[in-house]
Amino acid sequence: MLELLAIVLGGVVTFVSRAIFLVSRRLRPPKRVEKYLPLVGPAVLAAIAVPGILAPRDEISLGDSVPAVLAAVVTWLVWRWTKQIALGLLAGLLVWWGILAVLVLVFGLPR
């Protein structure tokens, strides 16, 4: 029961500390903190995506990691070239599926 109370209180404190800046127009985060806020989104996305790309099955292996890394690179390149994330994602998926199809056909790797 004490653990549940700690989790709930931690959630409430976290929510209030973040929501207070959205509710109040006069209360702003310190300038030092506000300067780094635009970097939070990309950092969180990288923390979620990079382990899934480099070690999709909780371990790094060439059969799983290389197609994902190549697809991520193609996604980024197409996005930078076209400025359209949907095209980048489509290109990355096509590359990933293509590499996996070649691996299955050539090496008979199970998927």
Image (spheres, rainbow, N blue to C red):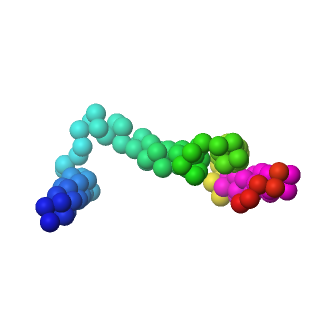
Q: Is residue 62 visible?
A: yes
Residue 37 position, x and y percent, is 36, 42
Q: Is residue 8 left or right of residue 110?
A: left
The secondary structure that most of the magenta stretch takes on is: helix
Residue at image point 81% right, 55% down: 108
Residue extent of the magenta highlight: 87-106
| Residue 7, horizontal then vertical, whole percent | 21, 59
Residue furthest top in the image? 32
Left or right? Give the position of 56 relative to 25.
Answer: right
Q: Is residue 52 left or right of residue 77?
A: left
- The quadrant in which the N terminus is found is bottom left
Q: Depth check: give the residue in front, 9 or 85.
A: 9
Q: Residue at x 43, y 47 (%)?
A: 44
Q: Nearer the viewer, residue 23 or 10?
A: 10
Residue 34 percent location from the top left of the image: 31, 40
Q: Is residue 103 magenta?
A: yes
Q: Is residue 29 above or below residue 100?
A: above
* Residue 21 belongs to the span the image colors magenta: no
Q: In the drawing, does residue 107 fall left or right of residue 89?
A: right
User: Could you tell me residue 67's position as x and y percent?
Assistant: 71, 47
Does residue 80 appear in the picture of this structure? no
